Image: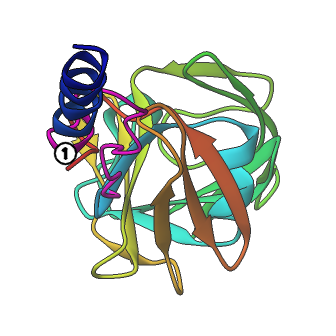
Amino acid sequence: MVRILDSFKYGVFAAALAFGAVGCDDETTPVTSPTTAKLPVSGGVATAVKDKKFTFSGGVSKFGTTAATDVTFTSASAATIASGGKSATTMLRFGSCIFTVTACTPPAMCPGSLATGMTVNVDPCTVTADANANTGTLALGSQNSGPTSLGDVTITCSSMTSCTVTTPSGTVTFTPPTGSVGG
């Protein structure tokens, strides 16, 4: 009787192992990185797209420009705005993009309706990086720039909640929207 009971016990254990009922589950959901990433502009994002000119062919209404307008992030906390042969140097803060004009070239002649000392808050303010095309676009409010070359762009995700965008100018970590990664 003991041998039959032991045999039955070991047989149930072997069957459980064979069907995966006992033991640890080593399966993990593979993380598939997205090919595009929409990033709210921050100091890290401004650094990652540093010195890249984003051109708005029809101007930027928040700046009062109607001709082609270029926005270039020059550091994590500064940008230039250029249109019609005039440019404005700005300090940059975030929560959206908050541009404070510090100087104009030629002096006292800023593009559009901008003026030295003026603060312009643009929301939303995002950069969309495209790893397939190695480009990015800048959205200021409801207006979008044309694509700008960012150099070699990679987007990698190490988990369902942490991804990075890497450009030759810098790396930005972001939380992807729900459902945009995974396999």
Q: Position of residue 139 (x, y in %)?
A: 35, 42
Q: Image quadrant of residue 115? A: top right
- Residue at the farthest front position: 1
Q: Main secondary structure of the magenta part?
A: loop
Residue placed at 61% from the left, 67% from the top? 166
Residue type for callout 1: Ala
Residue placed at 82% from the left, 53% from the top? 107
Q: Secondary structure at mark 1?
A: helix
Q: Is residue 24 magenta?
A: yes
Q: Nearer the viewer, residue 37 or 123?
A: 37
Q: Is residue 64 above or below residue 35?
A: above
Label count reads 1
Boundaries of the magenta span:
17-33
Q: Position of residue 95 (x, y in %)?
A: 61, 15
Residue placed at 65% from the left, 50% from the top? 172
Q: Position of residue 31 (x, y in %)?
A: 35, 51
Q: Nearer the viewer, residue 136 or 8?
A: 8
Q: Is residue 54 magenta?
A: no
Q: Is residue 109 visible?
A: no
